[in-house]
Image (cartoon, rainbow, N blue to C red):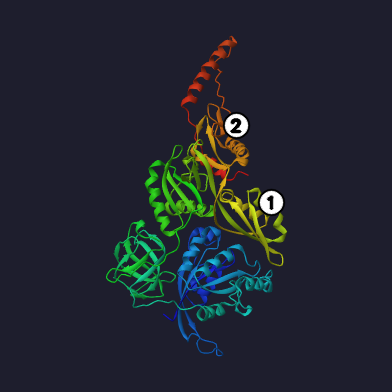
Amino acid sequence: MQNIRNFCIIAHIDHGKSTLADRLLEYTKTVEGKVSENQVLDDMDLEKERGITIKSHAIQMQYKYTPHSELVSGFPSEGVYTLNLIDTPGHVDFSYEVSRSIAACEGALLVVDASQGVQAQTISNLYMALEHDLEIIPVMNKCDMDSAMPDMVEDEIVELLGCKREEIIRASGKTGQGVEEILQAIVERIPAPKGDPEAPLQCLIFDSVFNSFRGIIAYFKIVNGTIRTGDLVKFFNTGKEYDADEIGVLKLDMQPCKQLSAGNVGYIISGIKTSTEVKVGDTITQVNRPCEKAIEGFEEVKPMVFAGVYPIEAEDYENLRASLEKLQLNDASLTFTPESSVALGFGFRCGFLGLLHMEIVQERLDREFDMDVITTVPNVSYNVYDKHLNKIEVHNPAGMPDIAVIDHIEEPFIRASIITATTYIGNIMTLCLGKRGELVKQEYISGNRVEILFDLPLGEIVIDFYDKLKSISKGYASFDYHPNGFRQSDLVKLDILLNGEQVDALSTLTHRSNAVDFGRRMCEKLKELLPRQQFDIAIQAAIGQKIIARETVKQVRKDVTAKCYGGDVSRKRKLLEKQKRGKKRMKQIGNVEVPQKAFLAVLKLD
């Protein structure tokens, strides 16, 4: 156990985590020759296309360590060390992946880009690691770039961590500079895992994946005890028992082995077919010698954004459920419950951590499970209090009680931390105040970089805040947030009516001050997108019974008067009257199809 080191790499998005991981794998000869490629751990097509990490990836390396001659006793002895590396995502929407990876480690490499300095997600991930008492090794990446500012960035890291300057390792994921020092620092500074190989078995499940041939594969970290192939094991929370058909370690592929003991990270295949039986954060123990209590897992994930996901064909409902369950195994931050909508039939109300997360889930459903789905307008959850002050949680505007019984509504707020260059402060302040934000404080980190803290309503930032922030700051502002309770707000439910029929999937909850403007823009957008029919379509935006905006999609006139080529004008009029009556009858039974484009367009109202 003294020769095991478990560590993860944490950083802001685009600071070069995956590239640095590539160099570590090449240096330790874990990948070589034909297998080696850029971002070797990002194995999903989506990750390669977008150049971002979506999933945490675990891999084991062997490193031959030789101590420096000048080192005093008490340092690790010479020998081969097993390093378990977990590469984590950097985007704020995938912070739950990072928190799970941190729970399986004793140390972390904190990577900071030498040309960009400390950013919001760097600070957020660092605090997460410090809460778990991880040993932090600061690494300054991209030192070979012309735009690098190593001395200035070093000042920022020293101020953030309170470490000594000489503890910061200068590296480059591109050229491989500093890789050996990083590996030596991992062995010297990160403590070996604590645990007793002889104690009853305790393993923490930190991830799982579905394989259509072998069932569910769970990834775990052994805290205490030893597990062997063929053991009868029990999952603590579900109480189910299984045979450990195969256990092993995660190299580039899964590598089976006979036994694994405390401190190791590995996988278990036990022929589990039902996805509900494996919970991330559960504890595995042996049936004949169970442990006293489960390991303290990680906190339950709290979704921030809710949206309805509906199959395009009604008969695909069960397939969609199976696909979501399999996807949930691999992405523990996805939550879903069944719901139905008048306009779209049966589907699921899904909870996501953010808009990028929602987009990725939709894309993965399409690519990995061949599911065509319609996604409704994303919204957040509200607390609605009735006249007797009973609280109702509302995730969907369609579930709002009648306006007459509501006393007040509370909406979720977040504490947002935005780090930017001083040049862009004015624009960012304008954006946040326009989203009903309240400035909490601003402080200068160094030279011309400032951190601004805002309290913002989550509903306002859900749709396009991140994109706008990036564009007004030319990509230089970084953004991170955490929930900050609920506050009372003057919110109203805005309904969209087509020919007097309410379309529940287009309903939204919005602040009273934005309602008229938002309703008008929505009607104008729908007028462009709805196909014309044989009858007029009235598009109305309403708050309760009050109509606040209206547009009309004119009918297609197919007035056939060709056969009236002569004679009195009254014959022509008679024919047109007859058609008018037919169209009136059609309007009574005709229903208006709302294309998927219309749902998506509401997101991009600008």
Q: Name the kind of residue labelled 2 in the image.
A: Glu
Residue at label 1?
Answer: 430
Q: Quadrant of residue 90?
A: bottom right
Q: Foreground: 114 or 145?
A: 114
Q: Is residue 12 visible?
A: no
> Where is residue 517 shown, x and y percent of the image?
63, 39
| Contact between labelled residues 1 and 2, with CB atoms less than 8 Å apart | no
> Where is residue 283 shown, x and y percent of the image?
37, 66
Work out which residue is located at the far left of the displayed protein and give it. Answer: 288
Q: Quadrant of residue 206?
A: bottom left
- Residue 327, relative to residue 77: is it above or below? above
Q: CA distance from mark 2 to mark 1?
A: 31 Å
Q: Name the kind of residue labelled 1 in the image.
A: Thr
Q: Left of 26 or right of it: where is 439? A: right
Q: Foreground: 102 or 161?
A: 161
Query: SS for tag 1?
Result: helix
- Residue at x-position 49% and y-position 67%: 41
- Residue at x-position 63% and y-position 67%: 118
Work out which residue is located at the far top of the displayed protein and give it. Answer: 568
The N terminus: image quadrant: bottom left
- Residue 407, relative to residue 539: is it above or below? below
Whichever of labels 2 and 1 marks the residue nearer the N terminus, that label is 1
Q: Is residue 301 visible?
A: yes
> Where is residue 396 shown, x and y percent of the image?
48, 44
Residue at label 2?
Answer: 551
Q: Left of 591 or right of it: where is 116? A: right
Q: Residues within 10 Å of mark 2 (few under 14, many from 20)?
A: some
Q: Residues within 10 Å of mark 1 (few under 14, many from 20)?
A: few
Q: Left of 482 or right of it: where is 242? A: left
The C terminus: image quadrant: top right
- Mark 2 or 1: in front is 1
Query: SS for tag 2?
Result: strand
